[in-house]
Image (cartoon, rainbow, N blue to C red):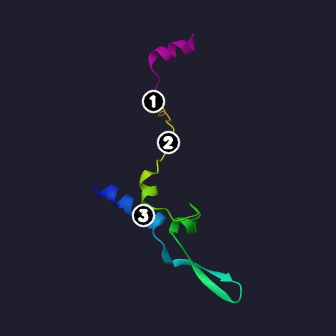
Amino acid sequence: MSQCRMFLLGYVYNFCTDHDSLAIKLYLPNSAHCWVRRTPAVAAGLTDYRWSMLELLIFKIPAPPFIPPKRRGRPPKPILQEASA
């Protein structure tokens, strides 16, 4: 259970929380500027906006495709007999 909490905390940190150290200066006309705050996921290019907690919690991650494990060792006898025939 604590591992699930750590994953959730990491996702909130990276996708939902703005960080001052990642802010970039946006120059405006008339010598003005403002700071654009970003999350680590935005800075890394994984997303283009800050996610809300609701959006993070309802996001569904697709399951990876099933790849059957490779068979190791000698093949069973019926397969050997078919190959030699």
> Can residue 79 be found in the magenta stretch?
yes
- The answer to which image quadrant residue 48 occupies is bottom right
What residue is at 47 percent from the left and 47 percent from the top? 61
- Say which quadrant the N terminus sits in: bottom left
The CA span between labels 3 and 1 is 45 Å
**SS for callout 2:** loop
**Residue 12 location, x and y as percent?**
42, 63
Q: What residue type is labelled 3?
A: Val
Q: Which of marks 2 and 1 is nearer the N terminus?
A: 2
The CA span between labels 2 and 3 is 23 Å
Q: Which residue lies furthest to the right in this view?
A: 29
What residue is at 56 percent from the left and 13 percent from the top? 84
Q: Which amino acid does label 1 sit on?
A: Gly
Q: What residue type is labelled 2?
A: Pro
What residue is at 51 percent from the left and 65 percent from the top? 50
- Span colored in magenta: 71-85
Position of residue 35 in the picture relative to residue 75 (left or right): right
Mark 2 crowd level (few <14, some 14–19, many ≥20, 10 Å Cα): few
**Residue 45 location, x and y as percent?**
59, 63
Nearer-the-camera pick, 23 or 79? 23
Instruction: Report the residue marked by disc 3.
Output: 12
Instruction: Report the residue marked by disc 1.
Output: 73
**SS for callout 3:** helix
**Residue 7 location, x and y as percent?**
38, 58
Q: Which of marks 3 and 1 is nearer the N terminus?
A: 3
Instruction: Report the residue marked by disc 2.
Output: 64
Q: Nearer the viewer, mark 2 or mark 1?
A: 2
